[in-house]
Image (cartoon, helix red, strand yellow):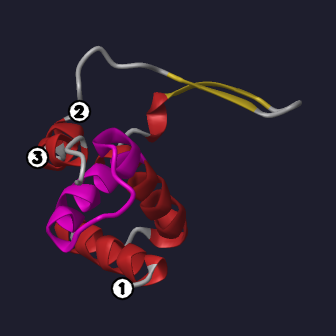
Amino acid sequence: MTGADKAAAIREKAERLAGRSLGENGDALTEMAMERACAWCGREDIPEAMEQAVAALLLDMEGREAAVKSVTRGDTSVTYAVSDGQSAALAGLAPWRRLGRLKEG
């Protein structure tokens, strides 16, 4: 499955979970959620079993649009409000985070 196919599958799962379309920001949110999930888990790929957890992360990120604390336009700077706890969506990625740390060979 190509990266575009993987992104489409994750977006479709997120839209089914939400019960609505993600609109024009859906592709960008999907890509950001995929990158964040891979970084969080120390992985370079997203297996099919992980797609639903990434879809949940996508919806969590979408719901946190108000988390932007400040925006500077000259030389572009965005500051995000930081939460004290770990989001439930990131906690849902925990099994893949542990597996991502295992070394092959």
Whether residue 3 appears in magenta in the rendering, the answer is no
Q: Amino acid at mark 2?
A: Ser
Q: Residues within 10 Å of mark 3 (few under 14, many from 20)?
A: few
Residue closest to the eye, 1 or 86: 1
Q: Is residue 69 above or below residue 30?
A: above
Left or right of 1 in this view: 105:
left
Q: Amino acid at mark 3?
A: Pro
Kindly identify the residue that appears in the image at 43 percent across and 63 percent down. Answer: 30
- The alpha-carbon separation of the residues under discs 2 and 3 comes to 15 Å
Residue closest to the eye, 78 or 41: 41
Left or right of 1 in this view: 17:
left
Report the residue marked by disc 2.
87
Quadrant in the picture for the C terminus:
bottom left
Q: Residues within 10 Å of mark 1 (few under 14, many from 20)?
A: few
Task: State whether the magenta stretch is mostly helix, strand or loop.
Answer: helix
Compare marks 2 and 3 and give the one earlier in the sequence.
2
Report the residue marked by disc 3.
95
Please state the extent of the stretch shown in magenta in the rendering.
36-59
Q: Residues within 10 Å of mark 2 (few under 14, many from 20)?
A: few
The x, y position of residue 38, in whole percent, is: 37, 51
Kindly identify the residue that appears in the image at 47 percent across and 21 percent down. Answer: 81
Q: Are marks 1 and 2 in contact (CB under 8 Å)?
A: no
Report the residue marked by disc 1.
1
Which numbered mark, 2 or 3, is in the foreground of this view? 3
